[in-house]
Amino acid sequence: MFSRLGSNSSLFEQGQNITSLSSVDTFDYNNNYNINLNGHSSFNSAMNGLESNAQEQLFNDNGYSFNSGYGLIDAAAAVGKAAGQSTFADVPNLGGNNWGADLVKAPEAWAQGYTGQGVVVAVLDTGVDFNHDDLKDNIWTNPKEIAGNSIDDDGDGLVDDVHGWNFVDNNNDVSDKFGHGTHVSGTIAGENNDFGVTGIAYDAKIMPVKVLGDDGSGSYTSISNGIHYAADHGANVINLSLGGGSSDSTLEKAVEYASSKGVIVVMAAGNDSGLQPNYPAHYADKSGIAVGAVDKNNQMANFSNKAGINSLTYVTAPGVNVYSTIPGNKYASYNGTSMAAPHVAGVVALMLSANHNLTDAQVRQIVAETAVHDTQMPNFGLSNFVTNSSATTSNFRVRNYEYGSYGSQNQLDDSNTVEFSGLSVSCTANSEFSSYQTLLNNLNYSITDYDDTTVSENILKQRKEMLEENLLMVT
């Protein structure tokens, strides 16, 4: 029986100061970035002052890059290994709007008969338009529930959860008015019907679990409840194209619970140009997979959070100008790590269709070992750490707002206020330089917990010099 976390466990109701979660992509219908971020910490400049061997220092002994983790997900190799074979032979690219499938080599797995059959992927998001012509035949149905009889047939405490559950409004309406969850679902399991979009695992089933509201925001409690629901109702994969700036033990335990049930949780890394993933993707050190975004040339998207110093099961996937389904039998191209994560969820579904007995640990290992390792240099430097020098409040506004477009919620601290009706977001910006680490001249420098908004580049340089002088090593 599904055991839902009580409403009293809500971190908001307990008064804890956490960031409400929102989908972690930036997109609009014109396929460009129409947001003005004032005071948003961005780490996009090239590294300066590194010696000739510095690039080698940015990878650990396992080929893990602090920039892009283990690199680009490779379905041909991963599914091949899951099936006990070598990597599958190349096939012609599909081209056009299917470039993402080509880049992750999904058609190579399809050619071997692995299309996601028998696999259920739960999409924990803003809901799903399960009447979309490109999705309707791939929507999960609860086999133990009878539709429309107003009875809890399966005894899980939820009435008529025929196509999933809405943990925002506590009902069975999992429809998507925001568009985000439908877009994610098309990338995972859009039907192979010669129109629209073909999903990475086009024969998998989508389990709609609504954990984000119609404005794209939600709570840790709703997401945690959704993870438990999916794991208890037969999901094999969970896609979390969402994120927050702070850790939460309830959410972490939910991800671990799914892993213990053999469910692989795929999590978007976030779009803050940060040096490490947001939460829950940060939990990929123990469970699940964190996903960063690349473009069609396999270059890291400038908005994507990087893998970070501490090794995570982190891979990259297409997340720029990704074409997929939106409500009302429509399609659009979106950008974000939210778009990258479902590519990986789809590949995992292909792996499970080849070997349904794979555990979370085995999937994580195969994905890491078969990803296409790259040699991209991380884009960060001291010159970028001077932001918000005088302001304590950062405001930004979404420009050229159109129906369905959405500006990413920037997780600058734990007390952000989202006002979508006014098309603006007000954030308290404390110039946090948390857990910044880089390797220079074989020395680990750490710049942490700078909350003073008047911090200057000179202070940071002095801190660096002090670390050098004292040979302070931080791991």
Image (spheres, rainbow, N blue to C red):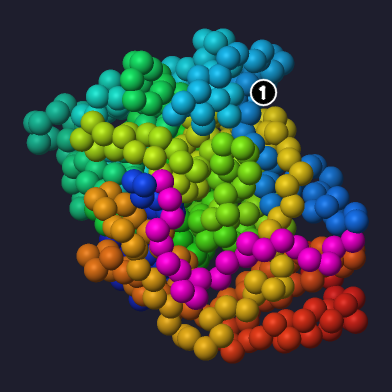
Disc 1 secondary structure class? helix
At label 1, counting other C-alpha atoms closer than 10 Å, the crowd grade (few under 14, some 14-19, many 20 or more) is: many
Q: Image point 56% across, 10% down: which residue? A: 112
Residue 247 placement (x, y as % from top left): 51, 63
Residue 201 placement (x, y as % from top left): 46, 24
Res. 368 visible in picture:
yes
Q: Is residue 319 left or right of residue 233?
A: right
Q: Indicate whether residue 47 is drawn in magenta.
A: yes
Return the residue nearer the eye: 369 or 200: 200
Query: What is the span of residues highlighted in magenta in the rendered image?
Result: 31-51
Disc 1 residue type (three-letter): Ala
Return the residue nearer the eye: 387 or 451: 387
Q: Furthest residue to the top?
A: 112
**Mostly what secondary structure, the magenta segment?**
loop
Res. 2 visible in picture:
no
Q: Is residue 428 above or below residue 172?
A: below
Q: Indicate whether residue 404 is drawn in magenta.
A: no
Q: Is residue 227 left or right of residue 80?
A: left
Image quadrant occupied by the C terminus: bottom right
* Residue 24: quadrant of the picture: bottom left
* Residue 289: quadrant of the picture: top right
The residue pinned by badge 1 equals 77
Q: Is residue 238 left or right of residue 278?
A: left
Residue 83 placement (x, y as % from top left): 63, 16
